[in-house]
Amino acid sequence: MKTLSEKQALLKLRNLKTEFRSFIRENYEHKAKSCLTCETKGACCLDAHFVNVHVTKLEAVAIGETLAKLNLEKQKEIYARIENTIEKYDLKSSGDTFAQTYACPLFEKEVGCLIHSVKPLPCIQHACYERKEDLPPDELQIEAEKQIQRLNEQTYKKFPRWLPLPVFLNLIRRD
């Protein structure tokens, strides 16, 4: 397997997500309710019983780079929210992490998603669909996640762990 530098892998990740986002937008989003007209903006992102978005190290690095573009005070505020989310919802990096749910610390009610340009695949694929048959098939996300996993393997040489978003952001911050 060809080795990739982190910089190369981040570029490939960006392209993969751009293609995924475009495909979802062109083929499915028109069947969903627009987030801009939602009566409860961000409810899906802040639903602690629903959100359990997992990411890999490479995705966490991309998100960390996006957060690093914010002013220092805002970064401190966001990382404090990340730590509070981990504590409040008792998020772990071991055990059945896919059973853990939380409210996303990267969503602000008056602003929206702070990492919109690099948000994880489940967030890209999610929308409010009236009819189940209008939903994008899970296989689309699964296939894209396999590609992300391969990028991680090519970059970090270890089988990539998928961890809750706040947990991984906290881990890479300390690296």
Image: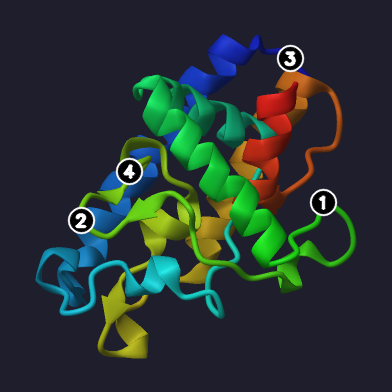
Q: What residue is shown with label 2? A: 110
SS at badge 3 = loop
Q: CA distance from mark 2 to mark 4?
A: 14 Å
Q: Nearer the viewer, mark 4 or mark 3?
A: 4
Q: Looking at the image, how many numbered discs can be counted on the residues?
A: 4
Q: Residues within 10 Å of mark 4 (few under 14, many from 20)?
A: some
Q: Amino acid at mark 3?
A: Lys
| Residue tagged 1 | 93
**Which is in the foreground here, disc 3 or disc 1?**
1
Residue at x 49%, y 32% (from the top left corner): 76
Residue farthest toward the right in the current orientation of the protein: 95
Residue 42 image point, x, y percent: 31, 67
Closer mark to the observer between disc 1 and disc 2: 2
Amino acid type at circle 4 is: His
Relative image position of residue 54 (x, y in whole percent) = 63, 54
- Answer whether labels 4 and 3 touch (C-beta < 8 Å): no
Amino acid type for the residue under numbered disc 1: Ser
Mark 4 residue element: helix
Residue 162 placement (x, y as % from top left): 73, 49
Residue receiving disc 3? 2
Q: Earlier in the sequence, mark 3 or mark 2?
A: 3
Q: Secondary structure at mark 1?
A: loop
Q: Which residue is mark 4?
A: 116
| Amino acid type shown at disc 2 | Glu
